[in-house]
Structure formats: structure tokens, C-alpha cells
Amino acid sequence: MEKGRILFLNGVTSAGKTSIVEALQERERPFFYVVANDLFQETVGERFLRENYWKYLAEAVRMMYYTARLFSDHGKNILIDGILVEQPEIAPHYALVREIFQGYPLDIVHVDCPLDVCRQRNIQRGDRYPSQSEEQAALMAQNIAYSLRVDTSLFSPQECADQIAAALFPDIR
């Protein structure tokens, strides 16, 4: 069985990853299942996250990657809504991702947005603190081999989804 494609949307909070995921899922093709850091964080009780946030989040994120691999093993395309941050509990994060997905059809897309725009989005959302994107940007893994970059300050989520589909799935109309 041919492995399903794995598409990792990497960017700081409020960069627009989830909006692009939603736009991609509105498309008839390609079809994707979705896993996300936020969803897997919810598998950990609040008590444990307060006790040792990075320890438990790192474990949940690793399990998310193995879950994505399982979908791919069954021929299903999977979207990962995440962020490659370097913390001791999961470092080197990008190397871990490359190791887990070695031999899998993985594309990493950088979902970019100026940090001042992310700050405004964080404030508007109300469920993030204003400087959260800047703090994450300082922790992001470096030297990632991106398949594509999209900028949500210049293009709508739908336009970014169209760019991704055109660049990474050119045979699908």
C-alpha cells in the first residue's frame, strides 16, 4: 500500500496554521485527516501540564507524530498543525521529526506572518497572550528544509491552501 502524504504546517501561534487547515479541508481534493499540537495537548490533564508542561507536551507531541505515521501507513493523507520548537524535552526537535518520518512522504510548510500581526491576532483571539508568538519564534527550530513557505499577512487562508495544493499536489485539480 502506498503511504499517505504527511503535510506539516509549522509556524508560531496565530500565524494562521489552523485557518489553512480548515481551508485545505474545504477542498474536495486532496483529502486530509488532521492532528494538531493543541488536540494532543488536551490528552494531558491540566494538573500534569501545570506540574511539568514541557515534559508532558513533548510526550504528547511524539505520540502525535507516531499517530500521523499510522495514518500514512494506511494510505491516508495527514495534516500536522504544529510548531517545531526546541526545548530540552524534545530537542533536537527537527532531527526527531526527520527520524520519525524517515522514508515517509513528508512536506513541511512554513506558515509565516510578521510577529506584529501575530501579536494583534493574539489580542483579538483573547485565548493567547500578546507576546506568545514572539516567545515561540525565539524557540523555533532553525535550518528546516521547507517544501514551501506561505505568508498569511499577504494571502487569505484559502489562497494559502491553493498555493499549497498547487505546489505540492500539482496533479490534483
Image (cartoon, grey):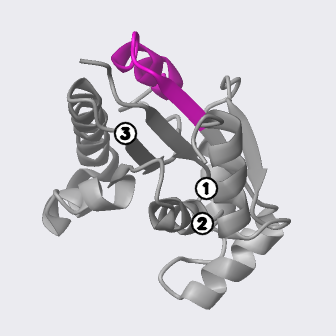
Label 2 sits on a secondary structure element that is helix
- Which element type, helix, strand or loop, lies under badge 1? loop
* Badge 3 element: loop
> Which label number is shown at residue 12?
1
- Quadrant for the N terminus, please: top left
First reached walking from the N terminus: tag 1 or tag 2: 1
Q: Residue at x 37, y 53 (%)?
A: 37
Q: Are marks 1 and 2 in contact (CB under 8 Å)?
A: yes
Is residue 170 found left or right of 106 in the rendered image?
A: right
- Mark 2 against mark 3, which lies toward the viewer? 3
Q: Is residue 65 above or below residue 105?
A: below
Which corner quadrant of the image does residue 40 belong to? bottom left
Q: Residues within 10 Å of mark 3 (few under 14, many from 20)?
A: many
x and y percent of residue 57 in the render?
Answer: 30, 47
Q: What amino acid does circle 3 point to? A: Asn
Determine the residue positioned at 40% across, 18% down: 104
| Residues drawn in magenta | 92-108
Camera-nearest residue between 94 and 90 = 94
Mark 3 — residue? 77
Residue 29 picture location, percent across and down: 48, 51
Residue type at mark 2 is Gln
Q: Residues within 10 Å of mark 2 (few under 14, many from 20)?
A: some
Which mark is first along the chain, 3 or 2?
3
Mark yes or no: residue 37 visible: yes
- Chain-order first, disc 1 or disc 3: 1
Instruction: Indicate the amino acid at tag 1.
Output: Val
Q: Which residue is mark 2?
A: 132
User: How many neighbours does mark 1 have within 10 angstroms: few (below 14), some (14-19), or many (20 or more)?
Assistant: many
